[in-house]
Amino acid sequence: MWKMIIKNNKVNLSMCIIFFILGCLNLIINNKMCRFFQLNNIVIAFIPFLVASILLMIFYKKEIRTNTMIIINTIVISLSIILLIINFGKLIISETFDRNTDVKNYPRIRKLYSDNEMQYFPAEIPKDAENIEFEEWAAFMQGGSGLYLSYDIDSKNEEKIDEELRGKSKYVLESIEEIKIAGENICVLADSEISEAIDYNSYPESSDKFIIYISEARKSSGDGYWNHGIQYGVIINKDKHRIIYFHEYW
């Protein structure tokens, strides 16, 4: 049977193989390189392979004129190419513009960063964590990328966490005043989304309700104002007993 299929339907068999390979490549990209696992995108990518397989069996079992087969194959190939281009385009748009807020995607997102960048972020979110918030977005043109994970912590563990973080942080900021001073040298907290995470504007100058542990903060280039840079670390909000992991590039 298979020898006859190969002998009499080489074009359709080639279509099946090519479309199957393209579907598998799309699956690998979704699994290894994408911020989201998009099941619809994966299914759509295999539609050309399924259609080509059906045509292969039909052409094998029924005698169809060569001209008719050529026309059908041409239409299928053309529509399949258009479908795959649109499907891939939607994937790119989603990966570029959509914000990731589903905490289930945290393990996937974490793997996209280096071990050094994720040294503060937990390998997995504690099962007993409450009020979990997660947000991640990709860089686009002049816009930067960011990753945030936060949840409530037991006040009894704050001292232990504080001791661990102090031992491996480059900078430890404990007041709004320190943040403003540091902003000229190591970070631009007021211009980042971290300010919203700690409710920056509601704290007085002498506030000691939070501690910011900065693992890395550096400028991309140039001197003076931070036009582009990177910063990541941890914030403990002692007022709300909450821990906030952050990674920002702008």
Image (spheres, grey):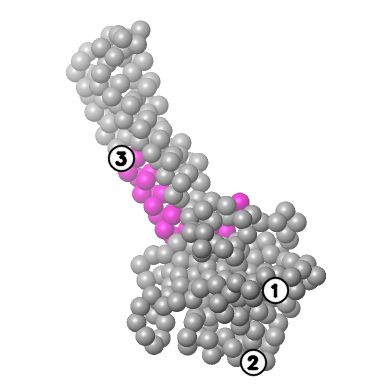
The majority secondary structure of the magenta stretch comes to helix
Q: Is residue 99 visible?
A: no
* Label pair 2/3, CB-CB below 8 angstroms: no
Q: Is residue 176 left or right of residue 69?
A: right
Which residue is pictured at 70% across the width and 73% down the height?
Answer: 163
Magenta region: which residues? 83-104
Q: Which residue is mark 2?
A: 205
- Marks 2 and 3 sit apart, C-alpha to C-alpha, by 58 Å
Q: Could you tell which of marks 2 and 3 lies nearer the N-terminus?
A: 3
Q: Percent position (x, y) of residue 54?
A: 38, 20
Depth check: give the residue in front, 200 or 163: 163
The residue positioned farthest toward the front in the image shown: 167
Which residue bears the numbered disc 3? 82
Percent across and percent down for residue 96 are 41, 58
Label pair 1/3, CB-CB below 8 angstroms? no
Residue drawn at x 65%, y 65% as measured from the top left: 150
Measuring from the top left, give residue 66's x and y in whole percent. 20, 15
Q: Is residue 108 left or right of residue 126?
A: left
173 lies left or right of 59: right
Q: Which residue matches tag 1?
A: 163
Kind of residue at disc 1:
Glu
Say whether disc 2 or disc 1 marks the residue closer to the N-terminus. 1
